[in-house]
Image: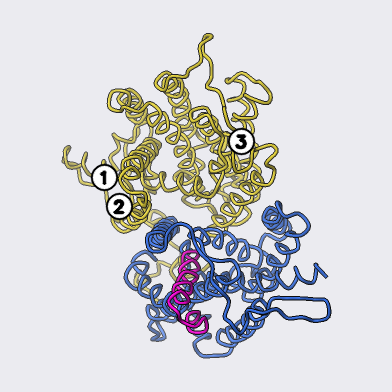
Chain colours: A yellow, B blue
Amino acid sequence: MIPFLDRPLVQFGLALATVLILPLAMRSGTLASEILIFGLAVAACNLLLGYTGLLSFGQGIFFGLGSYVAGLGLMRAGLPAPVMLLLSLALGALVAAAVGWVSIRRQGVYFVMLTLAFSQMFYFLAYTFSGVTGGDNGLLDIPRPRLGGTVLSDAWTYYAYVAVLFLVLFATLQRVALSTFGRTLLAIRDNEGRAGAIGYPVRAFKVAAFAISGAVTALAGALHAMLIGVAPLSNIDYHTSETLLIMTIIGGSANLFASLLGAGAYLLAADALSAIWPRWLLLLGLLLIVITLFLQRGLWGLIERAVALVTRTPPPAESLPLPLVGRGQGWGWRRQPPPVEGHPATPTANSSPQGGGGQPGARPAPEANR
Amino acid sequence: MTYLFQILNGLGLGMLYFLLAVGLSIIFGLLQFVNFAHGAFYLLGAYLAYEGVERGLSFWVAMPLAALVVAVLAGLTERLLLRRVYKLPHTFHILVTVGLALVVQELVIILWGPLGGNVAPPEELSGVMILGDFVYPEYRLFVIGFTAILAAGLWWLLDRTRLGAIVRAGSESPSNMALLGYDTLRINTAVFALGAGLAGLAGALAAPIRGVEPFMGVEALGIAFVVVVIGGMGSYAGALAAGILVGVAQSLMATLWPEGARLVIYLGMAGIIMAMPRGLFGRA
């Protein structure tokens, strides 16, 4: 970890720079808006994966929900866009809290499978009640928002609208991550049992993390529906959940800017490759395998290594799969030496005189006892 | 009478779900490895059976051959790729197998096209069985009988043989097994191949019933997860009971409320999890 890069202001600066550079570097305002929208949803996914240690396969639920809120709110209910966006935040939080509340009854892999099953459930819910959602066709002709009497029909003016919301929510997510609440999420991620033993209501914290993540994801979904003018069924299906998760891991779960990086890299690569070869998903599959084997800290890990090379600080250890320690130390904090597995600061009960070697069978490895 | 028809349909479907889920379950039990590529093995099994029949092989040859090829390919994948990933957190198990599933799915589309096709049931079983005024396709009856025998055989394998004992002991404590001198790496490969082979077999058996198409893998993966969640991970009886339950419920709903058939499955799963977080047969 390069502490400098994890400072909140640097992170926000990177996000701001991206927002400003995209219009200069890209031709398609639609694609640029998509990068910010997915960047937002991926950052929300990262709040669960990177900060809370919850691998949610259900983020598509909230994304799709937001799209439907946009379609129904703007067209059926005739709400103004800002009210509709607030509504998407509220509904996203509500549904995510419910999904989270049921899913966290199980842990680890079971939790992942539950969130995936829920994503299927909501997909079929949307598919079954086609009177509301338009079924396979989705909700069509969703209008762009108005600002000062003019409709933001130009791609780059809508980009500006998205960009402002993106920066506000990015900063909000940063505040959440840096707050006592966010710190507690890290504690839960690193050692759930210990956080509970100290007296934190672990489940309430997890549900709250879900709610925040779901709210932001739903807003991103609403923005996406207004961008493409459709709330498609595909926004709520398994593949959206999968894509959001893939973007999160490609970027790296170390910090929130890494999420924007992941979304951007995925969308740009998809745009370029799908034009060349319709079976580009094959390459994506191979890329995921390569990332697993060689690039476990994602693109952010690459950047860290590059910065380490330039500034001649020791490069971050690639062997550590997830940045478990010292992340985002906040302003003015010195980086502390990373604690070693097994908490060496407190002598363990059976560090007896005969030394730490011990018999292999006597104390099973943490993975062995389930 | 339509209900009996649907219940029989559901039984056949449920047994296929069981084959899928039990493979997923034993792989997870032994390797602590979440296999998101399980649906891809099912997909591959179905397409290999399809290819075999298209090339003029008898279904009786193509079906076991498809399962065998899937098992061998899965074993190789485990050996060359997945083995390097076990020590990483679950996130990367999921990432690598999602990647694998994408690769398989896209290869299937490249090799066989995006449209899918139909597989004729074997000639001996292409007719219908008539009992009074009850008519039922013979092939579906065969699937029920065959998978029932298979399930019994599998139970015998896992519960009564030395191999089964090794597998069960390995899922309790891999380090102790290694300490006793067992080659756990080879056991891992074998079990992974077995689980994937079962998924491939389920695909091959399902092909004459539902045809083949490139996205059947994703659907199967979702169902397999539901079955495992309802039945309780690592429980053979749970996989069987939940598989049949899901299959029969899905078939019955197909007559009562066709559009909502899938929805009911997932709602039911949510209900069961609320009431029994460990699933029907899950261990504490």
Residue A323 percent across, percent down from the top left: 36, 48
Q: Residue at x 28, y 34 (%)?
A: A4
Is A353 a magenta residue?
A: no
Residue bearing the label numbered 3: A93
Residue A281 percent across, percent down from the top left: 38, 52
Q: Residue at x 83, y 76 (%)?
A: B133
Q: Considering the numbered disc 1 on the image, is that residue within a helix, a strand or a loop? A: helix
Distance of label 1 from label 2 (alpha carbons): 8 Å
Q: Which residues are magenta?
A: B38-64
Kind of residue indicated by mark 1: Leu
Sequence-wise first label, 1 or 3: 3
The answer to whether one can see residue A329 in this image is no
Residue bearing the label numbered 2: A295
Q: Are marks 1 and 3 on the same chain?
A: yes
Q: Residue at x 42, y 35 (%)?
A: A39
Residue bearing the label numbered 1: A302
Q: Considering the numbered disc 3 on the image, is that residue within a helix, a strand or a loop? A: helix
* A308 vs B25: above or below: above
